[in-house]
Structures are given as structure tokens and as C-alpha cells.
Amino acid sequence: MTAALSLAVCVLAYIALFFYQFGAPIASGYDAANWITYKELVGNNTEGKRLLLFGDSSTVFGVNSKTLSEKLGVPVANLALHGNLPLDAITESAIKNSRAGDTVVLAPVWIYYFNDYRVPKDWILREMVAWYSDYFYGLPLKTKLKYISAIDVKTLSVNVDAKFRRVAILQEFPNRRALTAQEVKDQHAKIDWTVPQPFSYTFLNMNEYGDMQGACGNQPGATIASVPVALEPKVNPQVLKLLKQTAQRLNDKGVNFYIMPSVTVEDERSVQQWYHLALGSIMDQIRKAGIPAVGTPEDFFFPKTSFYDTSFHINCESTPERTSRIYNILKDVLHKDT
């Protein structure tokens, strides 16, 4: 009985410390938090029945939403987020930020389809502790338990200490916090867009539509290659389930929802017939699950010279071409939905 009681006390103490650590000013990707806040402001500032683009950074880059809006004749907002966020964080953002009459287009990179988004990764664990506790609180109980058990005692101890010394740490590292919506709004309003801005990954380098700016040319030393895929890839069942639920939840709100292929690097691997068939199989599995999808993988094949610094970020020179391809896919879809 004593051993059982001691174990229970230890478990309760661990859980209490787990929740206490939230908000600890640890080294983290606070820019990702500011992206979320800025994108929500972009969405709120876009009136009417909107086309909302969601996904990871492959959609943050390489889209000219202003041109797309002008050609389609509908308001467009690029609400894509950081590429390390779990898929359910992105789909929840789509549900939260859409309203009746909108069309949501989700274009995640191919690797999102293979991984179980419920499995905790080191990056999201850090962000959850630093600024993203809302994500944790929104998880199902079973997934919460996975996250609770994923943080080892040593890491928990460091996080708890940082939370305890929060005031002192923020005095030394004032940027270890997410900005408020008003701070994001005020800082962005100060930018002089009449002069060229240096490239950065912050929300300050995004225009009023949510598109990343200034990613021109090709970064030296960047490894640009197509994503490895299996000969007969299988979309993770949990991903299919999530996307189907997302489609239903959006439909219940009066929102149209579509999956669209992301970009692919055209190289020695991706030009092979088996690779085209493999990507096509992914889209077929999505459609067979009852999830609306538009376009084909081949619509978004681009040469290596079209990528800025990763295999997912289209540069400014190729942004018009990608935008044109998106338009050609969506023009009939939006006409059908209106």
C-alpha cells in the first residue's frame, strides 16, 4: 500500500509539474506563434466569401494571393502556417478561421500524408511548453497522455525551472514570448512597403494577404530534391480520418473544402513513371475516402531552379507560374460552388 501510495503521489506531482511548465520562456520558435496571430488578423481583415489557402510553409511561399484574387474575382487570404505544426493544428485553424460561404483549400506537402500526426515530436513539444498550450488542451485525452509521457524528467525539470525564473529570463531574453495581436498589428503597420525589405522568416516579411515576400533566387548550399516516397505509398489511416472529419465539420459550417497537391521538385527521381504513379495513388486514396480533391500532382512539378532555400519553398521568380496553375485549377471549382 505504501509503495502504491508513493507511486500515486509521484504521478500526481509529475502531472502537476507538467501543467506548471506551460508558458516557460525556453528557447523556442516564437515566430511560429506570431505567424498564427498574423494569419488570423489577415483572415479577419478579409471580407466577403473568401478563398482561404491553408497548409504549411510550401503555401506560405510561392503564392501571389493578390493576383489570384483579381483573376478569380473573390477575396483571397493565405492562412498557411509553419511546416512543423501537426496536421490537426492546421485543420483546426481552418475550421476556426473559416465562415459560411468560404472555400478552404488545403495543400500540405506529401510527407504529411504518411505520418501519424498524433505522435509527439520534439519540436511541437517545445512549442507547446513555450507558447502553444492551447493546442495541448484541445487534444483528445488519449493524445494528451501521449504528450504527457513524451517529456522526460530532465526536460521537465529544465522547463519548470525556466517557468519559475520567468521574469528574470524575460529580462535577459525579451523575445522569448509570443507577441499579442495588438503588438503584431502595430509592428506590421510600421513597415514601409515602398522600399525593398530584407528577407526574413518573420510575419513582418508577409504582405497583407499572408504571402511571404522577397524569397528570390536560389540560396547557396540548399539541398533541393523530391520527397522520398514508397513504390506503393499508403496514406496514414489517421490522416484520412482527420481529413474526412475536417471536410464534414467545414461542410456543416457551410464551407467548401478541397485538398490540392503541393509542390514537387522535378529531378531524376520524380520524373520516373513510378513516382508519378505513387503521387497519383496518394490523391486517389484521398478521393476514395470521400475527401474532395482538385488538381493532379503533375500540376505542381517545378525544376530545382524554382526553389528558394528548401524543397518546399517556391521562389519569387516562379511564384507567378505557380499562382497561374492554382488559378487554372480553382477557376471552375469556385464557379461551381457559387
Image (cartoon, rainbow, N blue to C red):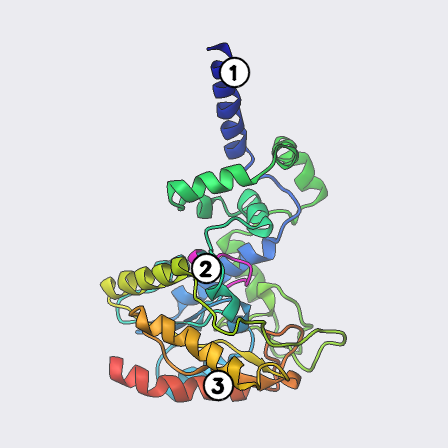
Can residue 258 be seen from the camera position used here? Answer: no
Q: Are the two marked residues, 3 and 1, in contact with CB atoms closer than 8 angstroms?
A: no
Q: Is residue 202 magenta?
A: no
The local crowd at label 1, few if under 14, some if 14 to 19, many if 20 or more residues have their Cα within 10 Å, is few
Q: Residue at x 72, y 42 (%)?
A: 172
The local crowd at label 2, few if under 14, some if 14 to 19, many if 20 or more residues have their Cα within 10 Å, is many
Residue 152 position in % (x across, y down): 60, 36
Give the residue pinned by disc 2: 87
Could you tell me which quadrant the C terminus lies in? bottom left
Residue 292 position in % (x across, y down): 32, 74
Magenta region, residue range: 81-88
Task: Tell me if 174 is positioned left or right of 279 in this view.
Answer: right
Residue 148: give its label: none
Give the residue type that dot 2 points to. Answer: Leu
Give the residue pinned by disc 1: 6
In the rendered image, the vertical position of residue 261 relative to residue 5, given as above or below: below
Give the residue type that dot 1 points to. Answer: Ser
Overall secondary structure of the magenta section: loop
In front: 236, or 323? 236
Task: Tell me if 173 is positioned left or right of 98 in this view.
Answer: right
Q: Residue at x 50, y 34 (%)?
A: 19
What separation in Å lies between label 3 and label 1 (alpha carbons)?
60 Å
Q: Residue at x 49, y 76 (%)?
A: 262
Quadrant assignment, res 140 = top left
In the rendered image, the vertical position of residue 17 relative to residue 148, given as above or below: above
In front: 99, or 21? 21
Give the residue pinned by disc 3: 298
* Callout in the foreground (2, 1): 1
Give the residue type that dot 3 points to. Answer: Glu
In front: 63, or 293? 293
What separation in Å lies between label 2 and label 3 (alpha carbons)?
23 Å
